[in-house]
C-alpha cells in the first residue's frame, strides 16, 4: 500500500473508521490529523464493536504507531475514558503517541460551546465537545498546547494572559461560572498526568526514520469534506479541515509523501446537526434508510437525517480533496429497496436553470431541487458478497453509474459493518 489519506466525502459518519481499520493492517504509522472527540468512529472486529473518538482506528493491530496529530484538539477527560476502555479490552496502547503540538480542549471550551449553542438564534447543532471554542483559541493564539502542560513556566505565562479574557467572556457574555488560576492549574496537572504516557517529543526522529525506511503512512480524517471549515456548508460545519490538505497541516508530513486519497461515501447521505443538504428525505423513505442503516450518532446518539446519494456533492469532494478513488459503504442498506435515486444535478426553482456544480452559498439552497435519476433495486441480500462479480447486476449498474458521475473509480465496496464484509475492487 502507498501512503494514503482516508477522508469522509460527505457530512461525516460515512464509515471511515471501518475503512481505516482495514487499511491500517498494511500501514506502519496511522495519524489522526484533525478534529477532536466530536468524532465517533466505529470498528467492528472479532465480534466486538469499538467506538473511537480520538484514538486512531489503527490501534487494534499490535505494533503500529498511532499518532494523534498536531492538528487535533484533545479533551483529556474523553481521552482517558477512551484509553481506559481500550485497556479493559486488553488493547495494546504502547504505539499510541500524542503530538506535543496538539491543542487542549479546556473546561471553559466545553462551557462556551454549550452556552453559545443554547443562546444562538441559528444553532449549528454541535456535538458540545468544545471543538469550535478550542479551535477559535488556537487560531487567535490563545490555545494551550499539549507541551504547555509539561512546562510550568510557559503554562503560567499563558494562563495570566488568557484566563482573565476567558473569565470575562464566561461571566459577562454568558453569565457562567469563572475559573480561578489555581483551579485551572490543578486541572492542567491532572491533564498532564492523563497525557504523559503518550506524549511524543521525539516525533521528528520517528518521522525521519519513517521517511528514510519508506514506512507506510495512513492519514485518518474525521468528519467529512462537507463539514470542512473552508469548503463545507459554512457556517454549519466543524472548525477544522477534514479535506485532504488538512492531512498535511495536521500531521506534519508534506504533500509530496501522499500518494492515494480515498474518499468514503455512503451509498446514500446522512447528516447530523443543522444545515441543509439538498437530497434530504423528510418522508418514510428517509425513515426507512435511517432504520435499515441504524443511522444514529456514534458520539451523541442523535438520529441522523437521511437522503439519496448526491453525485454533485461527491464530484465537489473529488475536486477539493483530489480524491484518487472512492470507498462506497452501506450498500447493503438498499437490499430491500424497489428503487434507488441518485441526484445528478440541481434545478434552481427561481429560473429553472440546471447546474451540476455545488453552490457554496448555502443561502441559495432553499431554491434548489435535486434532479434525480432512478435505478432499480436488486432486492437481495448482498451482505455476504465477497467479490464484485458476486454482486447482483442492478447493484453493479448503480455503482458503475456512481463512478461515471463522480469521475473516480470505486476502490472499496462495503456491504456490512464487519471486516469481512468488504470488497476490494
Ligand atoms: P465514521 O465516523 O465515518 O467512522 O462512521 P461511524 O462509525 O460514525 O458510522 C458508521 C456506522 O456504519 C458504524 O456503525 C459502522 O459499524 C457501520 N457500517 C460501516 N460500514 C457499513 C456497511 O457497509 N454496512 C452497514 N450496514 N453498516 C456499516
Ligand atoms: P465523524 O468523524 C458527523 C457535526 C455536528 C455539527 C457540526 C459542528 O464521526 O464523522 P462540532 O461539535 O464539530 O463543532 O459540530 O459538525 N459533526 C459531525 N457529524 N460525524 C462527525 O464525526 C462529526 N463531528 C462533528 O453534528 O453539525
Ligand atoms: Mg462517526
Image (tube, rainbow, N blue to C red):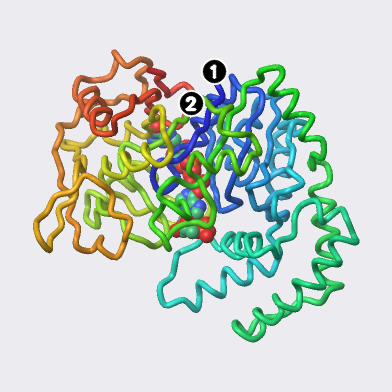
- C-beta proximity under 8 Å, tags 1 and 2: yes
In the displayed image of the protein, which residue is found farthest to the right? 153
Which is more toward the observer, 336 or 141? 141
Residue 29 to residue 53: above or below = above
- The image position of residue 30, as x and y in percent, is 63, 31
Q: Residue furthest left?
A: 352
Tell me the number on the disc at residue 88.
Answer: none
Residue toward you, 348 or 266: 348
Is 198 left, or right, of 340 in this rendering? Answer: right
What residue sits right under mark 1 in the picture? 1
Residue at 45% x, 30% y is 262
Q: Secondary structure at mark 1?
A: loop
Horizontal side of residue 167 vs 194, given as left or right: left
Please name the residue shown 79% across and 43% down the image: 199
Q: Position of residue 90 (x, y in %)?
A: 73, 32
Q: Quadrant of the N terminus?
A: top right
Q: In the figure, is residue 122 to the left or right of 183?
A: left
- Work out how far the residue at label 1 is from the one at label 2, CA to CA, in angstroms: 9 Å
Name the mark nearer the viewer: 1 or 2.
2
Q: Quadrant of ligand 1?
A: top left
Provide residue 5's location: percent of width, then percent of height.
52, 32
- Image quadrant in which the C terminus is located: top left
Q: Label 2 belongs to which residue?
A: 260
Q: Is residue 301 visible?
A: no
Q: Quadrant of residue 59?
A: top right
Sequence-wise, the earlier of marks 1 and 2 is: 1
Amino acid at each position: 500500500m502507498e501512503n494514503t489519506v482516508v477522508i469522509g466525502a460527505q457530512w461525516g459518519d460515512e464509515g471511515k473508521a471501518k475503512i481505516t481499520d482495514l487499511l491500517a493492517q498494511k500501514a506502519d504509522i496511522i495519524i489522526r490529523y484533525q478534529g477532536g472527540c466530536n468524532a465517533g468512529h466505529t470498528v467492528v472486529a472479532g465480534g466486538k464493536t469499538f467506538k473511537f473518538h480520538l484514538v486512531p482506528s489503527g490501534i487494534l493491530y499490535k505494533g503500529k504507531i498511532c499518532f494523534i496529530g498536531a492538528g487535533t484538539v484533545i479533551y483529556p477527560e474523553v481521552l482517558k475514558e477512551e484509553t481506559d476502555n481500550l485497556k479493559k479490552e486488553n488493547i495494546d496502547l504502547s504505539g499510541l503517541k500524542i503530538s506535543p503540538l496538539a491543542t487542549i480542549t479546556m473546561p471553559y471550551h466545553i462551557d462556551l460551546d454549550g452556552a453559545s449553542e443554547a443562546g444562538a438564534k441559528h444553532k449549528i447543532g454541535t456535538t458540545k465537545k468544545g471543538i469550535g471554542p478550542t479551535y477559535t483559541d488556537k487560531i487567535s493564539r490563545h490555545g494551550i498546547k499539549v507541551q504547555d502542560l509539561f512546562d510550568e513556566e510557559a503554562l503560567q505565562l499563558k494562563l495570566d494572559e488568557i484566563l482573565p479574557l476567558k473569565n470575562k467572556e464566561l461571566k459577562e457574555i454568558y453569565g457562567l461560572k469563572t475559573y480561578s488560576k489555581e483551579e485551572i492549574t490543578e486541572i492542567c496537572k491532572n491533564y498532564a498526568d492523563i497525557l504523559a504516557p503518550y506524549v511524543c517529543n521525539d516525533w521528528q526522529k520517528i518521522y525521519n526514520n519513517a521517511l528514510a525506511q519508506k514506512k507506510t503512512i495512513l492519514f485518518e480524517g474525521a468528519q467529512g469534506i462537507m463539514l470542512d471549515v473552508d469548503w463545507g456548508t459554512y457556517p454549519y460545519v466543524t472548525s477544522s479541515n477534514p479535506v485532504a490538505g488538512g492531512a498535511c497541516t495536521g500531521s506534519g508530513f508534506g504533500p509530496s509523501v501522499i500518494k492515494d486519497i480515498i474518499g468514503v461515501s455512503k451509498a446514500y447521505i446522512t447528516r447530523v446537526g443543522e444545515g441543509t443538504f439538498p437530497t434530504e428525505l423528510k418522508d418514510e423513505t428517509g425513515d426507512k434508510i435511517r432504520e435499515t442503516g441504524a443511522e444514529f450518532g456514534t458520539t451523541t446518539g442523535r438520529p441522523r437525517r437521511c437522503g439519496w446519494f448526491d453525485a454533485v456533492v461527491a464530484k465537489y469532494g473529488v475536486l477539493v480533496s483530489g480524491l484518487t478513488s472512492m470507498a462506497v459503504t452501506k450498500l447493503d442498506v438498499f437490499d430491500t429497496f424497489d428503487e434507488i435515486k441518485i441526484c445528478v444535478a440541481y434545478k434552481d426553482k427561481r429560473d429553472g436553470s440546471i447546474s451540476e456544480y455545488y453552490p457554496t452559498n448555502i443561502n441559495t439552497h432553499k431554491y434548489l431541487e435535486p434532479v434525480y435519476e432512478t435505478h432499480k433495486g436488486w432486492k437481495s441480500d448482498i451482505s455476504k458478497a465477497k467479490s464484485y462479480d458476486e454482486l447482483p447486476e442492478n447493484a453493479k449498474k448503480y455503482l458503475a453509474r456512481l463512478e461515471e458521475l463522480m469521475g473516480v473509480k470505486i476502490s472499496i465496496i462495503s456491504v456490512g459493518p464487519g471486516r469481512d464484509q468488504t470488497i476490494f475492487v
